[in-house]
Image (cartoon, helix red, strand yellow):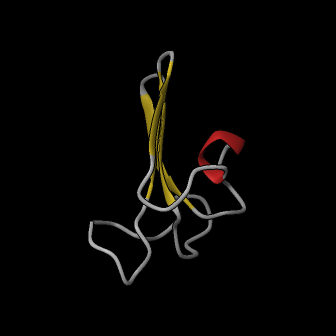
Amino acid sequence: MKRTCDVCGKEAIGIQCLGCCASTVCAEHAEQMLAGLKPGEKKEWGVCYYYRFEDETGTD
């Protein structure tokens, strides 16, 4: 699974799908909804979907 930010290339914390657009993002570029999730959590909110990656010690 890709683990680099689509915006800046830093280590990504998760994936956010905002309607029809999905991106892998770092903490700096994550929407608040994604940044507020715990590692491994997922959230669906309307047409948006957020997935916070597991910690490196966990499994994906």
Q: Foreground: 56 or 8?
A: 56
Q: Foreground: 38 or 1?
A: 38
Q: Residue at x 42, y 24 (%)?
A: 20
User: The C terminus appears in which quarter of the rendering?
Assistant: bottom left
Seen from this angle, which residue lies furthest bottom? 57
Expressed as whole percent of the image width and height from the top left, the position of residue 53 reads 42, 62
Expressed as whole percent of the image width and height from the top left, the position of residue 11 reads 53, 75
Q: Residue at x 44, y 74 (%)?
A: 55
Q: Residue at x 60, y 64 (%)?
A: 26
Against 52, residue 27 (above or below) is below
Q: Is residue 37 left or right of residue 3?
A: right
Against 9, residue 28 (above or below) is above
Q: How many labels were placed on the picture?
A: 0
Expressed as whole percent of the image width and height from the top left, the position of residue 18 reads 52, 29
Against 22, residue 37 (above or below) is below
Q: Foreground: 54 or 16?
A: 54
User: The N terminus appears in which quarter of the rendering?
Assistant: bottom left
Q: Is residue 34 left or right of residue 17?
A: right
Expressed as whole percent of the image width and height from the top left, the position of residue 10 reads 58, 75
